Image (cartoon, coloured by chain):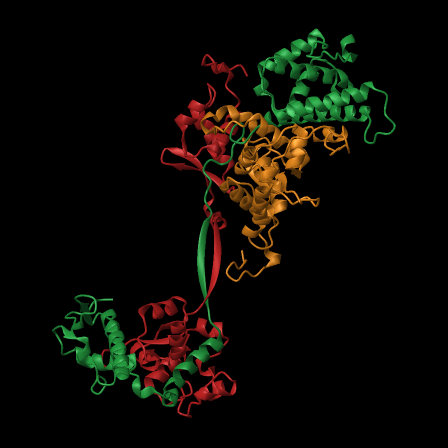
Chain colours: A red, B orange, C green
Amino acid sequence: MSIDRDTDEPILFDAPPIAEQERMVEAILFASAEPVTVADLNKRMPHGCDAAEALAYLRKRYEGRGVRVVRVGDAWAFRTAPDLSFLMQQERIETRKLSRAAIETLAIIAYHQPATRAEIEEIRGVTVSRGTIDQLLEMEWIRFGRRRMTPGRPVTFVVTQQFLDHFGLESARDLPGLAELRAAGLLDSRMLGVGNMPMPNSGDDDEDDVLGQSELFED
Amino acid sequence: MSIDRDTDEPILFDAPPIAEQERMVEAILFASAEPVTVADLNKRMPHGCDAAEALAYLRKRYEGRGVRVVRVGDAWAFRTAPDLSFLMQQERIETRKLSRAAIETLAIIAYHQPATRAEIEEIRGVTVSRGTIDQLLEMEWIRFGRRRMTPGRPVTFVVTQQFLDHFGLESARDLPGLAELRAAGLLDSRMLGVGNMPMPNSGDDDEDDVLGQSELFED
Amino acid sequence: MDDLFSDDPRGRGDGASVEDRLAAEALIVDVEGFEGPLDVLLTLSRTQKVDLRRISVLRLAQQYLAFVEKAKRLRIELAADYLVMAAWLTFLKSRLLLPPDPTEDGPSGEELAAHLAFQLERLQAMRDAAAQLMARDQLGRDFFARGLPEDMERVRRVKYSATLIDLMQGYARIRTKDDFRPFVLDRDAIFTMEEALERMRGLIGYVGEWVDLSSYLPDGWSEDPKRRRSATAATFAASLELVKEGKADIRQTETFAPIQLRRRERPREH
């Protein structure tokens, strides 16, 4: 190639072939830490080159490829094809044990659904933090049920299909009662509860409860 | 595509078409400045993909282009074609000038690896200063290898993937002139018994240090 | 070349050829620039202008000794290993020149010379290899990595786990709590936070002024120290709970001063 780079003399009749110019643009865009303008490309390439034209060929070449030549402002850069952006994420799944407060809240909802917050607090004997409820909602293990038709019309919570799936239950009614828990050795023998524990939704609750349950299984 | 990324269920009969896999490898290699191993590629791509096969296609596609797919040890990377280096003044990274001792030490480790400090000193006929080894370790061109199972269990040094990457070598087997040197017996460790010529007085005092440090790197 | 085999006892390098002395002089100029005796030997060997495999080790030894003598004469301090090498080369020279002593063990003079030649050849080979390595295209100089790498986004997803057993045990724990109570022995001296909270929820509604915490203690809990301690702790914990709920304000003017409580006019949103 007879381009005189020392004297900067343009030798127009001897510009590199366009395929070669395309390679140059490819290499420059690849190695540059920032998007490059056409003017910069022309400045860096040998005299007589037409960066805009080479760029047009390059863009065409990368159409449908895993990376594309994209315009950023008035400059150009390689970018991952948007449909492959999932490859650029490394997902790390951390498994954490659910907190005791969340477990207990969830258990109460499951056994007593639909349950209002006040009811949960009454049974647990402590206030239920907003965070605990939010977490269970976010996990989609509980959802809002019908409002209770009592003063203040409090919202109720019921368990979801995801909850049943996760715990391998067909319905919340399948949750074992206390007698069964005891028989299974899950209760400390000292904790002998008298037979006053309700079976989940054993029917001694009010009508709303029953409604709530059926609502759960509507969908 | 029915690959279930949530459940991580492999649906082997439905891997993406190889052209699609090639795009994925292209995107991943483009995105990373460091070489990526085939194992890592496979880990990041959907189940059922064959990164090695996709790589072969990709490599072919980029033959003669402004950027190329190069092998670095057991990893792969895109690198600009060396014949275009004249365009890259702006990207050039000024590297620290290596001393003659450092360059020779590096070459000895590369050609004789794994090499102990005593072997390096025997070949060069002088003690190897701590600073020289430290500099090469810091540049991540060498690392600790396995201990030699000889008295004193000396540590050995080997070259790294960064070394291969820097010098554009696919593997340490591709070092220039390696076969000739081996054929000439110049890579044998040839020792004479008694009456051997004087050896550099190896820095015995800091040997403990070296030992201690290497423990960190043992695998 | 005749000088080569002479071992002039008057020494001082006078026995070396003119060429050797010139070489030695040239080396002296830059002793600091040498990387040890082997490096000097390699440099000297070049003056023989032959392939390293065919080098005259004897002559090389002579050249080296001339170099050391010259340094001595110029009162140039040479590092110890240069002198050790000189001693060894003198020994090698004598081995090469004298008929072999059958009583002596170890390698012969020829073997030692061959090994030295091997070492020189190997050092030269490594230098050539190093030069070839450095002449290669290098990353960041001749070829380049992606200048704008796209960072891998690390998405951390937390997955909470709970088993059916956890759930049932949790429920059992709550439902048996009440039954459990009567079995606790020294309960009569314990005032629980729940009890305190219940009591205070009732009382706080009436109090718009700062009131001492101690006045919230239930009747009959202030005399016995044990009962007072428990009631105070429970009441304090309960008042913190009320503050947290935004239903009350709490203050203490200084360390150990009485803790005071007041109803919050407009409960905090949360």
Task: Looking at this view, name the residue that lies furthest to the left.
Answer: C209
Side (left or right) of B157 relative to A121:
right
Side (left or right) of A32 relative to C75:
left
Task: Looking at this view, name the residue that lies furthest to the top.
Answer: C18
Q: Position of residue B124 (x, y in %)?
A: 65, 28
Q: Position of residue C123 (x, y in %)?
A: 68, 26
Q: Nearer the viewer, residue C83 or A81?
A: C83
- Quadrant of the drawing holding the N terminus of chain B: bottom right
Q: Quadrant of residue C100?
A: top right
Q: Position of residue C229 (x, y in %)?
A: 27, 79
Q: Nearer the viewer, residue C50 or C15?
A: C15
Task: Looking at this view, name the residue that lies furthest to the bottom.
Answer: A195
Tell me how many marks there are. 0
Q: Residue at x 35, y 82 (%)?
A: A211
Rendered position, C182 above or below C174: below
Q: Position of residue C216 (x, y in %)?
A: 19, 80
Task: Looking at this view, name the residue that lies furthest to the right.
Answer: C102
Q: Nearer the viewer, residue A38 or B30?
A: B30
**Residue A149 appears anywhere in the view:** no
Rendered position, A72 above or below C44: below
**Residue B39 appears anywhere in the view:** yes
